[in-house]
Amino acid sequence: MSTLYTAIATATGREGRAVTNDGRLDVTLAPPKELGGTGAGTNPEQLFAAGYAACFASALTLVAKRMKADVSQASVTAEVGLGSNGDGGFALSVALRVELPDELQGESGRALVEAAHQVCPYSNATRGNIPVTLVVE
């Protein structure tokens, strides 16, 4: 693989701070209340959800352009779940909710979302590692 871009970020843990090397992202981290934390900051699952949603939306736009479809009114919501892996560790799951315009409902919209799932780097990285559910709305 030929690398086109490298993102660099440093974090101090779930309670601390995460900063990109260019300083454009600088966030306070805190576990959510559901995990016994204060909820006074963002958490890694939220960051992953935001990144996956943005990346998938871009992949959807790329695929739609190739298929001559208009997805300018589409949106992607990523729901990232954190749970036990049964071996004392943790695992993630993802549901991608893709809201498409009315004219792309049905089979054509589903095909578009499936094609985007093959293009998106987050989808390619997670495939076979964590469950990802595609929901077309």
Image (cartoon, grey):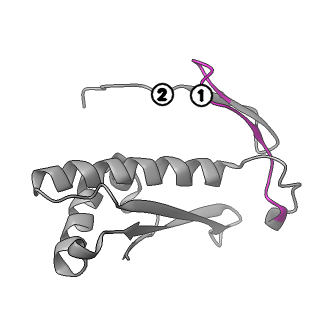
Q: Residue 36: horizontal and vertical position, in percent?
A: 87, 62
Do callouts 2 and 1 mark residues in contact (Cβ within 8 Å)? Answer: yes
**For this rendering, which residue is in front, 24 or 87?**
24
The amino acid beneath tag 2 is Ala
Report the quarter where the N terminus lies: top left
Q: Residue at x 25, y 78 (%)?
A: 105
Is 118 displayed left or right of 17 in the figure? left
The magenta stretch spans which residues?
Answer: 19-33
Q: Which residue is mark 1?
A: 9
Q: Residue at x 84, y 62 (%)?
A: 33
The amino acid beneath tag 1 is Ala
Is 78 displayed left or right of 128 in the figure? right
One can see residue 129 in this view: no
Q: Residue at x 29, y 50 (%)?
A: 59
| Res. 26 image quadrant | top right
Cα distance in 3D space between marks 2 and 1: 7 Å
Q: Residue 88: horizontal and vertical position, in percent?
A: 71, 65
Disc sitting over residue 54 in the figure: none
Q: Residue at x 45, y 54 (%)?
A: 53
Provide the secondary structure element on which disc 2 rests.
loop
**For this rendering, which residue is in front, 34 or 131?**
34
- Is 26 within the magenta? yes
- Is 36 within the magenta? no
